[in-house]
Amino acid sequence: MRERIVVFEGLEAAIRRIPDVAHWKRMFRIWHEWEQQGAGRTVVWIGSDITQGIVPVEKEERLWRDVTGWCYQQLAQLCDRVDRVWCGLAERMK
């Protein structure tokens, strides 16, 4: 068995470039299917939480924040494991 691990780091920055829910829904489905097609396949999604704090005034910033929050919720549903790291402390959420 050959392990294959794919890591997507900086998800919030990628979402900022393409703040389209349909695009990300397709991406998550495609990579989830890839992961399920073979033993040893793992996809790791890493993103910073930008959804807390003061709601931005600019429409584009609000859209980015909303789509990012939606994406993180979808990933939490799809993934077998969800960890949150805050101040260097990891918390297993799922």
Image (spheres, rainbow, N blue to C red):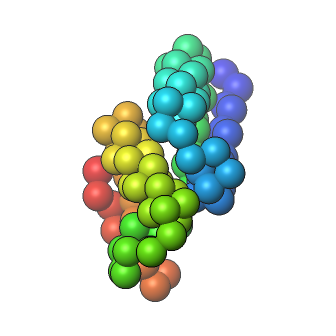
Say if 19 sits above or below 64 in the image: above
- The percent position of residue 42, horizontal first and vertical second, equals 57, 35
- The percent position of residue 41, horizontal first and vertical second, equals 60, 29
Q: Quadrant of residue 93?
A: bottom left
On screen, residue 57 versus residue 16, left or right, reads: left
Spot the residue most to the top.
Answer: 37
- The percent position of residue 48, horizontal first and vertical second, equals 52, 66
At horizontal 46% and vertical 85% (from top left) the residue drawn is 87
Say if 94 sits above or below 21 in the image: below
* Front-most of residues 69 and 19: 19
* Front-most of residues 11 and 70: 70
At horizontal 67% and vertical 39% (from top left) the residue drawn is 6
Confirm whether residue 57 shows in the render.
yes
Say if 26 sits above or below 10 in the image: above
* Front-most of residues 18 and 1: 18
Q: Quadrant of residue 83?
A: bottom left
- The percent position of residue 1, horizontal first and vertical second, equals 66, 22
| Number of numbered discs overlaid on the protein picture | 0
Confirm whether residue 39 shows in the render.
no
At horizontal 38% and vertical 47% (from top left) the residue drawn is 70
At horizontal 45% and vertical 75% (from top left) the residue drawn is 57
